[in-house]
Image: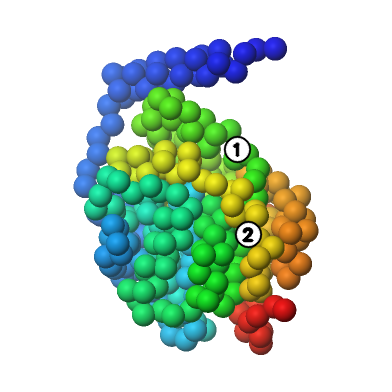
Amino acid sequence: MTHPLLITILLTGAATIAWVSRRLFWPVKRRFHPCRSRYLSTVSSQVIEVTDFDIHYLHQGEGDPVILIHGGGMWLYSYRHNLPELAKNFSVYAIDMPGYGYTRCRTDTSPYSIDSMADAIAGFMDKMNIEKASLAGHSWGGGWVIHFAHRYPDRVERLILIDSSGLDVKDVLEWELLKIPILGKILVRCISEEIVRRRLEHSFYHRGLLTDDMVHEVYVPLTFSYNQKALLKLCRNMDWKATEKSLGDIKKPILLIWGDNDRYLDPALAQEFLKRCSHIRLEMIRHCGHSAHEEHPGAVNSLIREFLGKEGNEVC
């Protein structure tokens, strides 16, 4: 059997060669970021100071507050098909979490952990004078809102989890490699639009939905050095043991949406959520990958509207 240390050394060496070659023969030109998002030129996003961060967010609609939390490697752009539709019934906020999108950290000391992510959501709600809200989280974002509900139960109405993290299982290989010192730092600097494209193709069941614009929008924030540093910290600090343990203590209604062809998080994990939290309602979406809200936005929007329109908040 090959020794794990040897595998790590070989991977590190290969990644180093790839990084040096790319820098020598394919120099990367980077410009100041705000002008590079076509999507942001079409919406009125804003920034607000929250503790150590300048949180970038988008708000639309009136009514009961709903906060949308993106997944790892993404930003509020991932909710582009959901926010305007949900805003017809609710006051909807989509935010870039610390380390992602166009949110910036004003200090180098942020721990970037599930605690700091939960605290960032709470701080954002404080600044926006939102006492209580329903929260939706995709992938890692699902894990973050689970932890938020555990830490701040009185500030949660309902939870929507979309192909959610939160169970103590290993991430896909690309995330696990980022946890390795030196290798992770090299890999994030090797991010290219082609790598982003392959990652998104793996996320979708209907790969024809993937566009050049989508690849570009996801790629740009991943090139910011401060986001790359944060990503490495987050990969190493995500404690899904804590979220899995807390699931049984959450007494809020939960809608769990999962794509039946998710290749990032096995759809069988949905049953594990059900075992740990009896008041979860599960909706499986057929012919759907890891990003149900992007691949089948109509179905997801309808499920969320119907779920949030039900009476009763507490589950005894």
- Is disc 2 surrounded by few (<14), some (14 to 19) or many (20+) residues within 10 Å? some
Q: CA distance from mark 1 to mark 2?
A: 23 Å
Residue 61 shows in the view: yes
Image coordinates for residue 155, horizontal then vertical, percent: 50, 75
- Mark earlier in primary sequence (1, 2): 1
- Which one is in front in this view, the residue at disc 1 or the one at disc 2? 2
Find out whether the residues at labels 1 and 2 contact each other: C-beta distance under 8 Å.
no
Image coordinates for residue 205, horizontal then vertical, percent: 65, 49
User: Closest to the observer: 153 or 82?
Assistant: 153
Q: Residue at x 49, y 33 (%)?
A: 179
Tag 1 residue? 172
**Numbered label tally:** 2
In the depicted structure, whether residue 46 falls above or below residue 259: below
| Figure quadrant of the N terminus | top right
- Is disc 1 surrounded by few (<14), some (14 to 19) or many (20+) residues within 10 Å? few
| Figure quadrant of the C terminus | bottom right
- Looking at the image, residue 297 sits to the left or right of residue 107; the answer is right
Q: Which mark is residue 298?
A: none
Tell me the kind of residue under disc 2: Ser
Q: Residue at x 28, y 67 (%)?
A: 48
Helix, strand or loop under label 1: loop
Q: Residue at x 59, y 52 (%)?
A: 242
| Colouring chosen for the image of the structure | rainbow
Image coordinates for residue 300, horizontal then vertical, percent: 62, 68
Q: Which mark is residue 246?
A: 2
In the depicted structure, whether residue 192 falls above or below residue 212: above
Residue 78 shows in the view: no
Tell me the kind of residue under disc 1: Val
- Looking at the image, residue 168 sits to the left or right of residue 184; the answer is right
Helix, strand or loop under label 2: helix
Q: Quadrant of residue 20?
A: top left
